[in-house]
Amino acid sequence: MKISIQTDSQIDETEIQITCRHLTPQLERVISILRILDFKLLGEKDGESHILDISKILYIDTADKKTFLYTKDDVFESCLKLYELEEELKEFDFFRAGKSCIINLRQIQKIRADLDRKLRVTMTNGEQLTVSRQYADYVRKKLGVK
């Protein structure tokens, strides 16, 4: 792979151009990583709105018809429904882990199989979450786990 960088003080916005023979899974991953840098979500805490970098979001959960965004140190409420967030984040390595939970694949530190074909994942903050049987095979495939 060849990487070229040109600097130009006259341009207003950075542009990244990829030239390739065909799109490979590795290139798709690079594109996903680049897109995640510009994508933000709005979360509310203590009456204030916060702009959140999605790479910092560990997982998203619903409780009592409210949607919460969990980061390493904080919890924010989102005005979006879980299915709306799932749709917006599907290209950024977020996946549905159960009826009320979406997990950021990049924030998983450990994975362990449970007896009932569910998965137990440990997030980078040490918190453990369960991936239901319905979504466990998808996670195994994405992580290359058998």
Image (cartoon, helix red, strand yellow):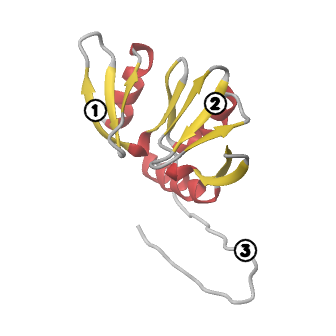
The structure residue drawn at horizontal position 39% and vertical position 34%, both measured from the top left corner, is 142
Q: Residue at x 54, y 80 (%)?
A: 5
- Disc 2 target residue: 67
Q: Label 1: which residue?
A: 111
**Residue farthest bottom in this picture:** 9
Locate the C terminus by quadrant: top left
Query: Is 2 situated above or below 137?
Result: below
x and y percentages locating residue 27 in the rendered image: 48, 53
Give the foreground label among 3 and 2: 2
What residue is shown at x 74% (from left), y 82% (from top)? 11
Kind of residue at badge 3 = Glu
Q: Residue furthest top?
A: 116
- Viewer-side label of 2, 1: 2
Label 2 Cα crowd, 10 Å radius (few <14 / some 14-19 / many 20+): many
Residue at mark 3 to residue at mark 1: CA–CA distance:
40 Å
Which of the pair 109/139 is nearer the observer? Answer: 109
Is residue 135 visible in the rendered image? The answer is yes
Q: Which residue is mark 3?
A: 13
Do we see residue 23 in this rendering? Answer: no
User: Circle 3 — which element?
Assistant: loop
Dot 3 or dot 2: first in sequence order is: 3
